[in-house]
Structures are given as C-alpha cells and as structure tokens.
Amino acid sequence: MTEQIKIGSTLRWTLQSPKETGVDNSGFYEFIEDNFTPEGTNSHISGVVVYISDGSAIIQVTDMTSDMFPFTLFYNEVKNRFYGFEVKEGDPYQKYFCLDLTTMVSLFYYYEGEGFLASAEFDEDDNFDWYEQPDTNEGLDSQSEMGEGFAPDQINIELPAEDIESYENQEAFCSSDDIEMTDDNGDICISEGGHPCSIVRANSWFNTRDCAIITAWRGGKSRKTNDDNNRKLQKRLRELGYGVTKITGWFPEKDKEVARENSFLTVNLNDEESFRSNIYELSELYEQDSFLYKKAGRDIPAVYVHTNDDTGKGTEELAGRLRIGNMEADVYSQIKAGRITFE
C-alpha cells in the first residue's frame, strides 16, 4: 500500500486501513475500542497527498465523516510538527490528516475532553503502541478549578438526594440562562451568587458561541492610560450586550517579545451577526495589532484578525485549535487557575 501513496495521489482511509498493512496494529484497535465510537461502517477520511517525509504523509482532506474529526489537524498544527510543510494562502479551516506509512495509523489524535493532541507511539518493531498523552498531568483538573467557596459548574455524577440538596445550597446547579449574568466587576457568572467564569465554562463558550479576546492595552502607553482604556472598553462591550470576563493574557505585539496584557474574553451571547465587526472596530479604536476571534463550533480554529496597517489591516492569521492546560506555551490566556491556548 505504501508504494501507491505519493504526492498528488488520492487516498481513502478507514479504521480498517491499518489491518491491510499486515503489521501488528492490535494496540491501535485497543485504543479505538477504548476511546473512539464510529458513527457507522462508512467512517472515513478522503483526500489528496500533499507532503511525504520520513515515512509520514500529510493528506489534505476533501471528504470525511464528522466522527473522524479527532484524527485531523488544522494547517498551523501540521506546520508546527512538519517544518518542511507549507501551503500558500492556506485556508485556516482546512483539515489535514497525518499518516504513518508503515502502519497506516493516524499520527495524531485529538482528545476533546482534555483539550490536547496526542502523537502516535511505536514499539521497537515499528508497530503502533499507543497515543502518547504529553499533557495528561497538566490538562483540565476540575478539582484545581474549585477554590475555597467555589462550586463546580456542573455535576456529572449520580448523587444521593441528600448530597444533591447540599450542592444545590452551594448554587452548583445552574441553567443555561445563568451564564448571561455579570457581577459588579463585569465578570460573567454562573449564578446569582456571582461565581466568576472558570476554564470549564470558557471551554463551553468557545465551542458553542462566537468569542473574542480583546484588550485596550498598548505597549508604550502608561499603566494609567492602559487601565483607563480597558475600563472604557469593558463598559462598551457590556453596553453591546456581550458576556465579558477579565483574563490575563500573554500575547506578542508586532516585532516585540510576548508581553503581559489585561484582556477580556468576550462572548456573543445573543448570536448577533455584527459581533465580529463590532470587535474589529473596538480593536481598531484602541490601536491594537489584532484580536483573537473564534467562531462557534468545536472543530473551528481561532484566528488573529489584524486591525492596523503594520500587521496587514483586515487580514487573518491562523491561531489554531483550543487547548486546555498547556503549560509550555509562550502565548496563552489565564482564567482563574486554568490556562487556555490556541495551537
């Protein structure tokens, strides 16, 4: 099968493809059984081979069943792992599939619940062993999000009636309507009690609502000026009816090193069509190089939207897919005890 795979050739990959190599891929099928539920017998990824290097191939996806999304990567994710891979004017929403040519096993798998990509591990005989999970110990830890007096956003286990009552007293249960509320500091809350936005809730918003990360801070201005501008920005965002919560971000300005900024996670709670254009105008008003924008949908990557001439006003640059708890990233946002990145 490897001899048939070359740049420009078409390929259709199914969960049965690794079996056709004759290589022992029992580990792959153990993983599939434990972690993946195909929607049906038609599950597949089809596309064109656009890159081959060191026994690996990259397929630009032209057709796939939705359940196969965890096996795919976006352009910048591929580029970060294959330094020779380059596509001019690449579509940030284009999906790619990376394949080991010996085993015909996907090189990467995306753990939705944990928010990270795992890479394939092979034994000394080049048989698939398992997907390495480098961020397992640094991923989302619900216990670490629950500081003193902080109730969990949602309880997903069955509890005796008396335990449920005790949690209700902590306002742990909330309806979808509750997330639209803000406290006196402008933080999005999950209940009238005023528990501020946690990374669990932020993850949900990024997947279900259009979101943006924006700041009025600007290098070269005084702290007082930046703080005053941020207060004005926050006030305007709330007037527009958006959900707003304060976050701390580390982002690069053009031709400068990564710097700390006080920013706002902004959520399009009412699904307004003007959300992106309104955020654009505010970013432009406060002389920002760009803002981060993500359309709703778990399989939609975020982009940096540039808003001044130096960075290419009106253009977009792929930021990547949401990841939770990557402690190695240089560019990230801190929400309470959690960290989010786009890679």
Image: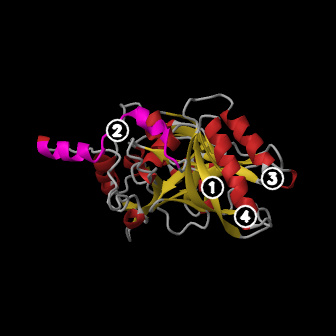
Q: Amino acid at mark 3?
A: Glu
- Where disc 3 sits, the SS reads loop
Earlier sequence position, callout 1 versus callout 3:
1
Question: Is there any visible trace of residue 243 in the rendered image?
Answer: yes
Q: Is residue 70 left or right of residue 243?
A: left
Compared to residue 178, the image places residue 133 above or below, namely below
Instruction: Check if residue 334 falls in the magenta segment.
Output: no
Earlier sequence position, callout 4 versus callout 3:
4
Q: Amino acid at mark 2?
A: Cys
Q: Are marks 4 and 3 in contact (CB under 8 Å)?
A: no
Mark 3, residue position: 287
Earlier sequence position, callout 4 versus callout 2:
2
Query: Which residue is pictured at 45% across the width and 51% down the height?
Result: 196
Earlier sequence position, callout 1 versus callout 4:
4
Instruction: Check if residue 174 falls in the magenta segment.
Output: yes
Residue interval drawn in magenta: 162-184
Between circles 4 and 3, the one closer to the viewer is: 4
Mark 2, residue position: 174
Mark 4, residue position: 224
Residue 286 or 2: which is nearer the viewer?
286
Q: Are marks 1 and 2 in contact (CB under 8 Å)?
A: no
Compared to residue 321, the image places residue 174 above or below, namely above
Between circles 1 and 4, the one closer to the viewer is: 4
Q: Is residue 279 left or right of residue 108?
A: right
Check residue 263 in the rendering and tell me which mark sits there, or answer none: 1
Q: Give residue 169's quadrant in the image.
A: top left
Percent x, y of residue 52: 62, 56
- Where disc 4 sits, the SS reads helix
State the CA–CA distance, disc 2 to disc 3: 38 Å
Q: Amino acid at mark 1?
A: Ser
Percent x, y of residue 188: 49, 45
- Please rate how many residues cluster around mark 1, counting C-alpha atoms within 10 Å: few if below 14, some from 14 to 19, many from 20: many
